[in-house]
Amino acid sequence: MKYLSPTVVRGHQQKSHLRSRHVGRKRRGAAAILGLFLTISLIILTAVALDFGRINVGQTEMKRSADAAAMAACWEMHDNRVASESTTVIHSAAAQAANEFASYNSIGEQAPIFNSSDIVLGTYGADQSWSTGDPSSYNAVRLTLRRQSGANGELPLFFGALTGRGSQSLSTTSTAAMFNTIVGFYEPPTSEETLGMLPIALDEPSWLAAIADATEDKYEFSNGTVSSGSDGIFETNLYPKGGGSPGNRGTVDIGAANNSTADLSRQVLYGISQQDFVDLGKPLEFDSNGELLLNGDTGISAGIKDELATLIGKTRMIPIFRSVANNGNNAMYTIVRFEGVRILDVKLTGKKSLKRVIVQPATVVARGAKIDTTGTHYSTHLVTPVMLVE
């Protein structure tokens, strides 16, 4: 057996130790470089993630702002159209409302504004069609909101120096509309809510004559007050004339059959209730033939005169019928549309020839209305509340 001297062994040990220290230094240097690389990569990824999150938040804020602005502009358009303002005034009012409500919803800590060309008034159909051809049929506002160069500026990002992108261009479009293609009504969701409809039907020829300015204009409604005079809106009489023959008009049962005077009084004052929908026993909407059959009562009586008188100057919805069969409690009305009216005068005592419930066509917002997506049924003075459609 060969023996090594202690000196040789120590030499080998020293050389091995030196080699280990050298390899350790190389490994520590490589780990430091790798750690630095990973740290930089992590910082860049974090910056990208934060900027990506800012872009997503900005897009959400932009959509929220555009939606609010579109709805506000559509309500303003509706109010000004009802007031018979010019197209120029309507567009200006809609633009002002859009900018006002957009300012309440900042995008990246900045309140946006619309350019005039970004606000378009038009007609939005139940079939999702869009047209700007006929201002008289406008029912919608389409807005394009931008954060771009020259339009509110691009959205600044946090880490442009690291990612190479200092800002992001954003845009979104929102459309809000009101529809007059109304086919019926939903049941009120709670017992406290009601549908503002009178249980009194008007024949279609009388309605068409009123909206064609072929009746009389003896009443003026201005600043919430009704007086004698002319306001350019022609009237018709809800009180039934004649001897009860087909074509006559009167009260209808929207609820239990043979509504009592108490039921009619309640409905005149407060509207059609959830229980009335239940008692009706069928949907308050047109069938596949575009008709709704409602039973009739004996007619409008002095028993509801006080209730009707409290509505003078106010608006309500009414059913319009095309035909009626039989008389009194056996009458059956064929309802073909719903419309909005304003009550102007009520007199249900004295001579029958002088009795009257005078109304004029007036645009009413029909909450709880069902939209006819086929575009078959149209109301001239009844619209849904503003809703977002795009």
Image (cartoon, rainbow, N blue to C red):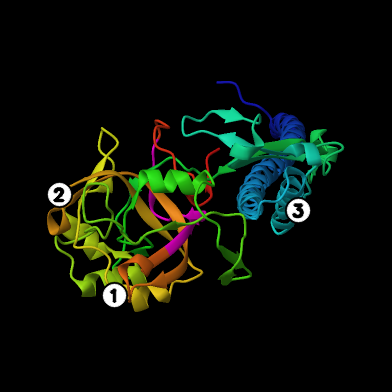
Amino acid identity at mark 1: Ala
**Which amino acid type corresponds to the residue marked 2 in the rendered image?**
Asn
Residue positioned most to the top: 1
Residue 260, numbered circle: none
- Measured in 3D between alpha carbons, the distance from the residue under mark 2 to the one under mark 3, in whole angstroms, is 54 Å
Which secondary structure lies at badge 1? helix
Does residue 27 sit above or below 189 in this rendering? above
Q: Is 380 in front, or is 233?
A: 233
Q: Earlier in the sequence, mark 1 or mark 2?
A: 1
Q: Quadrant of the C terminus?
A: top right
Q: What is the distance, in whole Å, between disc 3 and disc 1 at their CAs?
A: 48 Å
Which circle, 2 or 3, is nearer the viewer?
Answer: 2
Question: At which x and y percent is residue 305?
Answer: 34, 75
Marker disc for residue 96:
3
Q: Classify mark 2: residues with Cα within 10 Å, few (<14), some (14-19) or many (20+).
A: some
In the depicted structure, whether residue 143 falls above or below residue 189: above
The quarter of the picture where residue 376 lies is: top left
Query: What numbered label is drawn on residue 302?
Result: 1
